[in-house]
Amino acid sequence: MSLSGRQVQVVAYPRGPVEERHFEVVEVPVEPVGPGQVLVRNTWTSVDPGLRLRLREAAPEGYFVAFPLHAAMDGIMTIGEVVESRAEGFAPGDTVWHARGWRDYAVVDASAVQLSGLGTLRVLDTSIAEPQWYLGVLGGMGLTAYAGLSVVGALKGGETVWVSAAAGAVGSLAVQIAKLHGNRVVASAGSDDKVRWLLDDLGVDAAFSYRAAPVGEGLAIAAPEGIDVYFDCVGSDHLEAALDAMNRDGRIAICGSVSEYESEPAGPRNLFLAVAKDLTIRGFRGSSNLDLLDQMQAELGAALADGRLQQRETVFDGLASAPKALIEMIAGRTTGKTLVHLTDVR
């Protein structure tokens, strides 16, 4: 019996803000399952800021490639259930992750390396965590937060750590991980509601809204003695403020620059402070630190189980809502991990 399913396709590259008209939902036949492959019915799919970089005619050099027009959007982390398997180690009913999201069904080559290895087909243990948590705290988001703090030595404790975009999927985990390791944590976000959540629920030591006053002013009040570590998700004026506030021998971990995803790049004007203060600035990707995945899942899984760590989600229902979810996330109108629940797979 032939099977068909829907997939979201890009039909035009945005020249400014992302809009729903840049996408369409298309019904396509599902290809037969070949040797070494499995058929997965997708149940949850991820929405991440980095997807905006792939909605350009050419993605940044060295990054994941741009999404082609009028084709499936490969390279999006997804959770699903195996329907049919012709691959050893995978059986119908298994919950798996892979990187062929924003579609109802995916035929996945079990041996194919996806997203530098992070998205390679893998069976998940849903007895210890909700399936969708593997797209957040126990997946790429958790790995990015954990790895970023690791590569700049911020897990030793006793320092002041500032995390920008701290109410987002990665930032909200980075602040909690930094707290768990004994740091004083400063957080910034884009609304008073998010600031209250960071203070009241996540227990950061100080927080401010970058919309209420210039970033440098908010940071000076929150961290009057300066900062030792900056976890950068934003770039631009946030990075500039961090350079001003960094203490000598401070470290900066850069995982993103969301302020520039829909506008022209605006680099810091005070970069020489990296020299004057003997700073270390380290760019990194979660998928480049797969050696930390098992360690991260064990540590953060235990913290989830005993309530020391929270996973907050903003969930959109149905495949067709994926473009809207991306638009809302980029606009700063979501909190925590943004997900699409594929409740309408036929």
Image (cartoon, rainbow, N blue to C red):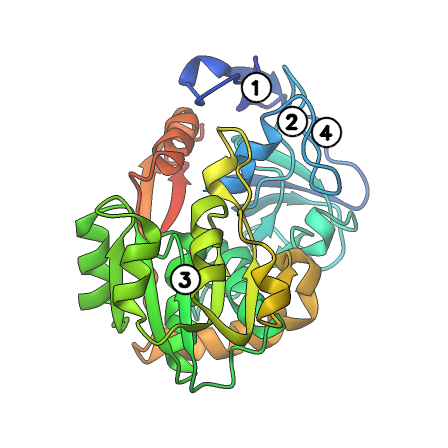
Instruction: Give the residue type that dot 4 points to.
Output: Pro
Mark 1 nearby-residue class (10 Å; few <14, some 14–19, many ≥20) = many
Residue 163 shows which numbered tag? 3
According to the picture, the residue beneath numbered tag 4 turns out to be 32
Measured as percent of width and height from the top left, residue 195 is found at 22, 57
Q: Amino acid at mark 3?
A: Val
Q: Earlier in the sequence, mark 2 or mark 1?
A: 1
Give the secondary structure at mark 1: strand
Q: Is residue 333 above or below residue 178?
A: above
Q: Amino acid at mark 1?
A: Val
Q: In terms of sequence position, does the residue under pointer 3 or pointer 1 come before the other? A: 1
Q: Which residue is mark 2?
A: 67
Position of residue 133 measured from the top left corner of the image (x, y, whole percent): 43, 58
**Residue 48 shows up from this direction:** no
CA separation in Å, label 3 and label 1: 32 Å
Image height check: is 53 above or below 180? above
